[in-house]
Image (spheres, rainbow, N blue to C red):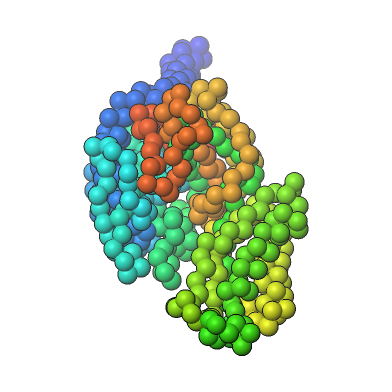
Amino acid sequence: MQLKQFNQWIILPTLLIFVTTLQAQQNKPITIDKQATAILPKVIEWRRYLHQHPELSNREYQTAQYITDHLKKLGMEVQTMAKTGVVAILRGGQPGPVVALRADMDALPVKERVEVPFKSTVRAEYMGDTVPVMHACGHDSHVAMLMGAAEILASVKKDVPGTVKFFFQPAEEGPPGTEEGGAPLMVKEGCMDNPKVDAVFGMHIESDIEVGNFEYKSGAFMASSDWFTINIKGKQSHGSQPWKGIDPIVVGTEIVNALQTIVSRQSELTKAPVVITVGKFHSGVRPNIIPEDAVLQGTIRTLDSKMQKETFDRIRKMATTIADAMGAKADVTFENKTLVTYNDPVLVKMMVPTLERTAGKENVREREWVTGSEDFSFYGEKAPSFFVYFGGMPKGADKSKAPPHHTPDFYIDDSRLDVGVKAFCNWVFDYAKAVGSKK
């Protein structure tokens, strides 16, 4: 055979196969977009079912089974961890990295006031009490969108680069009492390993961002959440003779007021915000008895590790000094609930174009940091992470009147959940393209 004939019969067909494969990979996002639009009715159905059947943190048994049944039908490897968490693995047909996609599953002890056909009337046990239960933070929509992404990615498995791990996480709102749970337990039990995750993505629907829009921040995005407890020891006395006792309630009120000066007078707020909130103040059993003890409990939100430590030191010093000055004693303890949710700047730069292509450049914007917290932050300790806000406010609604999260009136428009599904799927393909093929 002559060299010219060899080129025609060997080189040209090989080149044609390469070009065809490249075109197929480039067209994959278009295919995903069409599939996400087609699957939207199912995603809405899943979300509304979950909304009507909410479960509290670490008690998401039916939710986990609902998700597991779906994933097994897709032929995925499925395992349970962190009590009720579900982790599924999809091994793609092309070489590539390991990408994790996360959704949280738990609801809150809130009574729903929104009159929708799928309104929750569920009641459950929480810390010894029977309480109403509601998806008052949108976790039902997160689960539904990730279920949709799992179905689409499974349908194009042969084209998926690398491996995709789907995290359906329990107890994001915090496990009850002294139980372990949430992202820390997921990480502890190995969700980020075997195979080791190269990058992890997540999103949270927001009731005051217009439907279909994305907002993000590079670097520190959401605050760490720390809880503090101040136990005050006074001296009991009859209510008619306060001079014979040391009133821990009066001591406590002085401490509550003084703590706010840490924020207003001692913290460099131009560097990063700080929030100190006392949410519980318990003392006494009768109106005519000055009690011996009082307990204050609250939360601290910081976005800078140095400021976090400084805030701890200032709270401890202020509480103990005020108590000593009034003849009482104060003991201060701290408990870390979440870390700062940190969006890896390199990953953000790579993946923001994916959001812009998915939702339209005009519907993606960078925002300021947030004093709310997210235990998604624990995944970011193990791999580069990117967490974004996704809009659920009806188009044209007044942002200032949007019902806040964790309230009985919380409401989201689920008509554009397909945009979230697309983002999950496109992140998988675009991240692999950005970092190059590797296993």
Residue in the foreground of this view, choosing between 430 and 6 = 430
**Residue at the image position 34 percent from the left and 25 percent from the top:** 37
Whether residue 237 is situated above or below residue 299 in the rendered picture: below
Whether residue 40 is situated above or below residue 304 in the rendered picture: above
Q: Is residue 317 left or right of residue 181?
A: right
**Residue at the image position 61 percent from the left and 68 percent from the top:** 253
Total marks shown come to: 0
Q: Image quarter for residue 1?
A: top left
Q: Image quarter for residue 349?
A: top right
- Where in the figure is residue 243, as x and y percent of width and height? 63, 84
Q: Is residue 267 left or right of residue 219?
A: right
Whether residue 5 is situated above or below residue 34 in the rendered picture: above
Q: Is residue 308 visible?
A: no
**Residue at the image position 69 percent from the left and 79 percent from the top:** 326
**Residue at the image position 30 percent from the left and 55 percent from the top:** 132
Whether residue 29 is situated above or below residue 139 in the rendered picture: above
- Where in the figure is residue 189, as x and y percent of width and height? 43, 63
- Where in the figure is residue 288, as x and y percent of width and height? 48, 80
Residue in the foreground of this view, choosing between 413 and 82 = 413
